[in-house]
Structures are given as structure tokens and as C-alpha cells.
Amino acid sequence: MKSWLVIGQFVPGHSILHRLDPRTKLLMIFSYVVIVFFANNMASYSLLSVFALWTIFLSKLSLSYILKGITPIWFFILFSFLIHLFFTKDGDILWQFNKISIHSGGLVQGLTISLRFLLLIMVTSLLTLTTSPMEITDALENLLTPLKKWKVPVHELALMLSISLRFIPTLVDELDKISKAQASRGVDLRTGSIKSRMYAVVPLLVPLFISAFRRAEELAMAMEARGYHGGEGRTKLRQLSYKKLDYQAAIVYIAVMTVFFFLRK
């Protein structure tokens, strides 16, 4: 069964984003994550939103597929919005009932924080959706190569991150199977008090942890059987190289971000 969570999944394709060098995508996405926090008005947020939607269009992935795939994140986005809406007391009062009030500053703050969070999730999801775990590992290792001078295990760190991303949809599928199996045995996770729900989660977490440790052990044995001994002296089947498309994408991205900083107050 295919996981409904898009984070960690790779969707093969031949779009512009798929054909970009993984290092180009990593640098753009990491810089985008930082730049999002510099947005401070409607014009800058609008530009970042248009850019995010444009990249999704270039990836030839459905926007509804991505939004559906981040369903678990919607709870945190909504929670963040409500926290700022009811607890930020800046600006004019828009609505009030007894001691509960909504201020214009709280509404603006809630919308901007929620939009910022949504943009981060959408854009970072594109990295794993359009880049295979092996490409992410190679790109991270290549970009972090200077750290080897300080004896940092760059290859091992990149491999750990890649494996972690790859196992997210696997564990989600495993959790779905376990929850359905427990539900067929009469375990109720949706009704009852908070305390009873917390106790009901235990039958899910125990087999999930056991399954995770079993998969980790099987992976370690498989790597050992294939003679894996770290990154030192290893050769690569695929050599990373920047192409004309990468330079064009970098120029467009720099132009968009330049306009972004002009739009800021």
C-alpha cells in the first residue's frame, strides 16, 4: 500500500525539477527555508507563494496530492493559527465575547505564521518527491565535503539522513497496518477520555518500535553482507555534474529572491 504521507517519498519523473542536479535543489530549498523568515508584508509573502506554486507546477505533481500528503501537518498549522489568533493582543479589537477577544494583530500574525509553515512544508516536500534517497545522500556528502578537514564523518551523516527520510513512509505504512489490526481486535483509539486514549496508543507504539528495530537490524545485516565499510575509498556509480539547466535555474532563483528583498519593507 502506498503511503499517504508525501514526506520521504520519491515519485519518479522527467520534469524540470527531477532533472536538476540534487545539489542545486538542496541549496535552493535550504536558502528558501531561511528566506521565508525574512518575509514581512503581503507582497513578499505573495511572491514566495507564487514561487512555491510555480515549482510544484514545474515538478508535474498535483497540488492536491501534496496538500493531501501533508494532512497530519494541518493540525499543527491550525493549532498555530488559533494560538496567535486568541493570544496576540496587538491592534484593534475585531471580535469580543466576555474575556475572549480577537485582535487585528493576532489575525495577521496567525495567518502569516500559518502561511510560512505551509510554504516550508510544501517546498521541502518537493525535495524528496523529486529526488531519490541516493541522490540526496550524494548531494549532501558533496556539499559537506569541506567538513572532512575537521574529521566530521560526512558520508555517515548523509547516509543517516537519507535512510531516515526513506523510512518515514515505510513506518507510516507500518503504523497504518498495526492500527487496523488493533482495531479489528477491539482497540478503540477515537472515543473515550484522554487517559484511555493514551493507554490505547501503547498497543500501537510497542509493535511499531519492534518493527523499526527489526528493519534497522535487517538493513545493517544487508549492508554488512554487501561489504559496506563507510565512505572512505568508495566509488560512485553516478557522478554529479552541473548542467546548463542548473545554471539557468540558479539565475532565475537569484532573480526572484532579489525581487523579494526589494519588496520587503
Image (cartoon, grey):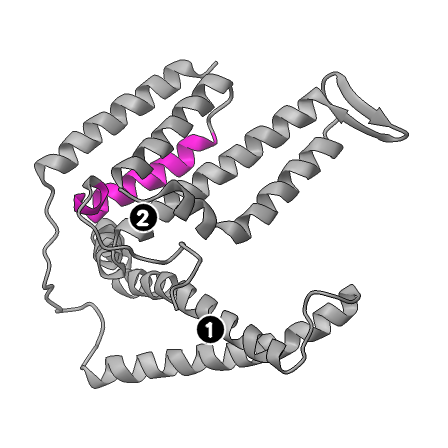
Q: Is residue 197 left or right of residue 158?
A: right
The region drawn magenta spans 17-37
- At label 2, the amino acid type is Leu
Q: Position of residue 249 (x, y in %)?
A: 20, 32
- Per the image, the residue denoted by label 2 is 127
The image quadrant of residue 88 is top right
Dot 2: what SS? helix
Residue sitting at x 32%, y 38%? 56
Q: Report x, y in % for residue 123.
A: 38, 41
Which label number is shown at residue 126?
A: none
Q: Residue furthest front?
A: 184
Q: Earlier in the sequence, mark 2 or mark 1?
A: 2
Q: Quadrant of the N terminus?
A: bottom left
SS for dot 1: helix
Residue on which disc 1 sits: 174
Q: What amino acid type is highlighted by mark number 1?
A: Glu
Q: Tell me which secondary structure the magenta stretch mostly adopts.
A: helix
**In this view of the protein, which residue sits in the foreground, 61 or 94?**
61
Please state if 4 lies on the left or on the right of 13 as rendered: right
**Rendered view: 43 above or below 215:** above
Within 10 Å of the Cα at label 1, are there few (<14), some (14-19), or many (20+) other Cα atoms? some
Q: Residue 228 in magenta? A: no
Q: Quadrant of residue 91?
A: top right
Q: How many marks?
A: 2
Q: Is residue 20 magenta?
A: yes
- Dot 2 crowding, Cα within 10 Å, few <14, some 14–19, many 20+: many
Q: Name the residue furthest right.
A: 98
